Image (cartoon, helix red, strand yellow):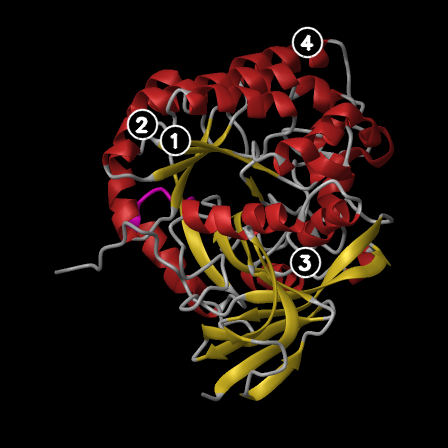
Amino acid sequence: MTADLVVRGGTLVSSSGRELSDLLITGGRVVGRSAPGTGEGNEVVDAAGLMVLPGGVDPHVHMMDPGLTEREDFPTGTAAAAVGGVTTIVEHHRSIPFVLDAQTLREKAAYLSDRSLIDFALFGGGHPDNIDELQPMWRAGAACFKVFTCNLHGVPAVLPGKMLKLFRTVASFDGLVLVHAEDEFIAAENEEDLRLAGRKDPRVVPEWRSKEAEQVAVNTVALIARISGCRTIIAHASHPEICSLAGRERALGASLQVESCPHYFHLTEDEIDQWGPYHKFTPPARSGADRDRMWTELEEGRIDMICADHAPSTRAQKDAGSDDIWEAPFGVPGVETSLEMMLTGVAEGKLSLERLVAARSESPARSYGLWPAKGNLDTGADADFVLVDPSAERVVSDADVVAKVGWTPFAGRRVTGRPVRTYVRGRLVAAEGKPMTDAGWGRFLPGPGYREETE
């Protein structure tokens, strides 16, 4: 059989191991493997010396589209994702208008139908006052519901009483929630004390968005997840104690996973003194000791998935906080640098490549209802993959950033391991740091509860 495309002589990587093999692709899907050098195809890609990884599935990105498109939009944001080896995203609900009902979800999916380079799914919002809208959104194709335990980014906190009701509702149709877990009352108390003291310096951030605030919220969320039976993911865990709290309830039967992000593996709270608003995100970076222990949590499986939390702000927006950190928005870009930052940990012996594939591709694909089409290179899966040169080195530079804001919190850092070519359903979408196709190739992927509209 002659395939449409043969990826020849690369090392295919999954969570269970590595295989030197040719990958055979026809009609945008994987149709098999063959011994190195034996695959026949109309197009052949030489992958000798390269690792062939399943495309990244990143369910934590904010493309601000429609809405705050001076910060990011789908054409630039998905181009950045493709450059970074991400082939599928799940985009959050805080576009304008917020996605809080089925009709808004459908309208957003239609609007984005020709604006993405890569495949995408969509979040709905889980707010205190839209619980009755959750099941209709699930049937309209939402992949997950985002819930906040604190008032943040214009989103209202879901406090424990409403949370239990919301989680039970989502559990009734086997839906999924992702929770931003920082305790509203501890954070508010910290803020009041800091403002009364006249504090405006960057150190406000880790003192305001404290470890204790995150721990208390995760403790509550994890318990309610077990009580309700709701499938739950803790978003952007910033330190190892979060994994311990989640693990305790998971051991008691909670359907609970933990997500984290590259900035918690590379940045520390001390660096905000130098970088100020450009390192303002929440939960914030923690201590060097916390950072170092996060690698062990990931390698040993207590962190389930790695996502970017791509939430860009312009330089002008960040610079507004140069003299008063309260004035800067939260968030950093990251979707195009995530793989490189984590591959650097692999090169340094902190993480196995197999665990990286599990956390970056397999686990999010399974959790968000995208498996088995996404997250793997088995026969029948979509031909979403990234060719990685594990020994390539470079210094991360703002000048190379594809995301609209043109900066990265990792500028100046030397990384080892680089995505060199990214494919979505067999089409080359990025090569050597540049997008290679136009917006419109990416498809909307309705969630597992999707039902077609009927009259």
Looking at the rendered structure, the kind of residue marked 1 is Ser
Local SS, label 2 = loop
Q: Tell me the element at label 4.
A: helix
Q: For mark 2, does the 10 Å Cα neighbourhood hold few (<14), some (14 to 19), or many (20 or more) residues?
A: some
Find the magenta span and give its range.
98-102
Q: Earlier in the sequence, mark 2 or mark 3?
A: 2
Circle 1 sits in a helix, a strand or a loop, which is it? loop
Question: Is residue 146 placed above or below 374 in the rendered structure?
Answer: above
Question: What amino acid is found at the position of numbered circle 2 in the picture?
Answer: Gly
Numbered circle sitting on residue 193: 4
Disc 1 marks which residue? Answer: 255
Q: Label 2 vs label 3: CA separation?
A: 40 Å
- Ranked by sequence position, the earlier of labels 2 and 4 is 4
Q: Using the numbered discs, state the Cα–Cα distance from disc 3 to disc 4 in whole angstroms.
A: 36 Å
Q: Quadrant of the N terminus?
A: bottom left
Badge 3 vs badge 4, beta-carbon distance below 8 Å: no
* Residue 229: numbered disc: 2
Marks 1 and 2, how far apart at CA: 7 Å
Q: Main secondary structure of the magenta part?
A: loop
Comparing 240 with 189, the one in front is 240
Check disc 3 and report the residue beneath it.
404
Disc on the earlier residue, 1 or 2? 2
Instruction: Give coordinates of residue 174: x percent, y percent.
Output: 28, 39
Q: Are marks 1 and 2 in contact (CB under 8 Å)?
A: yes
